[in-house]
Each structure stands twice: as C-alpha cells, then as structure tokens.
C-alpha cells in the first residue's frame, strides 16, 4: 500500500468506528429518554443513518484486512495454484456483484432524494442510501486491488 492509501484506510477506519459509536450512543440515549417518558423522535432515524454508514465503511475495512468470513474447508484441500485460482474467481464474482450494487444504489439514491426522515424533517433519506453507494464503490476498489494482487500471485506461482 502506498502512504496515501494507508492514510485513507486509517481515516476510513476512524470514521466507521465513529459512526458505530454514534449508533450505540444514540440508541442508548433514545432508550433512556423513552424510559424517562420523554422519547426522542429523531433518535432511531439518526441511529439508522449512522449504522448504515458504519456497516458499509466497516465492510470495506474488513475486506481490506482480510477479516470477512471465509469457509475454506474444501479449498484448503486443493493444490496451492488451484486455491489461488479459486480466490481470484471469488474476487471477480465479488467485483461483479459490487459493480451491480453500485449502479443500483446510485439509482436508489436518486429515487429517494425527496424522501425525508420522519423524526428529522429537512434531511433527505438519500444520505442513508448514499452509504450503499459509497460503500460499494470503496469495496469495489478494494476488490479490484485484491484481484490484481491475486492475479500476480496466480501468474507467478509464488
């Protein structure tokens, strides 16, 4: 990784952590307020917004660090060159799916531009759907870099 991409990855990780902390904090605050008889109308909407961003940014962080769930029971029985080919194929499928998700999420963001949150009037729901767009774009870039790395490994046999 270059120095720029390492910095970007670190910033992305910090933002994902902040959104997750915000989700937990707002959900807890909303629960306490509801228990005390003064519910916060905006709490669940803000928690939904921050959770969506935390999920998609966190998914990219996990993919970049190879932390996604992988069932490799049968793949580990294969010869090393075949395993590399399987990983390469899997990342190509992932990239294909993420490309489709990116296209459809842009369309969805456009369609939700006039929808507003119930508890937060004036804020468009598009900001939530843009988390899918941003996340799928970042995941696609990460998947493409993994494809490049796997291809080099597959070709060299190392």
Image (spheres, rainbow, N blue to C red):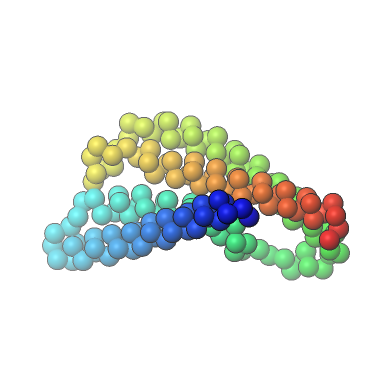
Q: Which residue sits furthest left?
A: 37
Q: Where residue 6 sits in the image (x, y, percent)? A: 56, 56
Task: Give the residue drawn at x 42%, y 41%.
Answer: 129
Q: Nearer the viewer, residue 61 or 27?
A: 61
Task: Give the residue drawn at x 72%, y 48%.
Answer: 148
Does the rendering let one see residue 85? no
**From the image, which quarter does the N terminus lie in?**
bottom right
Could you tell whether 126 is left or right of 122 in the image?
right
Q: Where residue 119 sits in the image (x, y, percent)? A: 23, 46
Q: Where residue 157 sits in the image (x, y, percent)? A: 86, 58
**Image position of 89 with respect to 66: above or below:** above
Could you tell whether 1 is left or right of 29 in the image?
right
Q: Nearer the viewer, residue 13 or 117?
A: 13
Tally of numbered discs? 0
Q: Where residue 22 sits in the image (x, y, percent)? A: 33, 59
Q: Nearer the viewer, residue 15 or 129?
A: 15
**Image position of 91 with respect to 31: above or below:** above
Q: Which residue sits furthest front?
A: 3
Could you tell whether 51 is left or right of 155 in the image?
left
Task: Give the residue drawn at x 68%, y 65%.
Answer: 71
Could you tell whether 149 is left or right of 13 in the image?
right
**From the image, which quarter does the C terminus lie in?**
bottom right
* Quarter holding residue 40: bottom left
């Amino acid at each position: 990784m270059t120095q720029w991409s390492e910095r970007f990855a670190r910033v992305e990780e910090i933002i994902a952590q902040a959104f997750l902390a915000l989700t937990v904090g707002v959900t807890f605050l909303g629960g306490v307020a509801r228990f005390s008889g003064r519910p916060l109308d905006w709490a669940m909407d803000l928690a939904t917004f921050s959770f969506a961003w935390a999920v998609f940014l966190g998914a990219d962080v996990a993919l970049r660090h190879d932390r996604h769930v992988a069932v490799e029971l049968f793949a580990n029985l294969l010869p090393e060159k075949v395993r590399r080919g399987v990983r390469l194929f899997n990342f190509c499928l992932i990239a294909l799916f993420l490309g489709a998700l990116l296209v459809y999420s842009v369309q969805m963001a456009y369609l939700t531009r006039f929808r507003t949150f119930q508890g937060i009037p004036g804020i468009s729901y598009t900001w939530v759907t843009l988390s899918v767009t941003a996340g799928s774009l970042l995941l696609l870039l990460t998947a493409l870099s993994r494809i490049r790395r796997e291809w080099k490994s597959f070709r060299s046999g190392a």
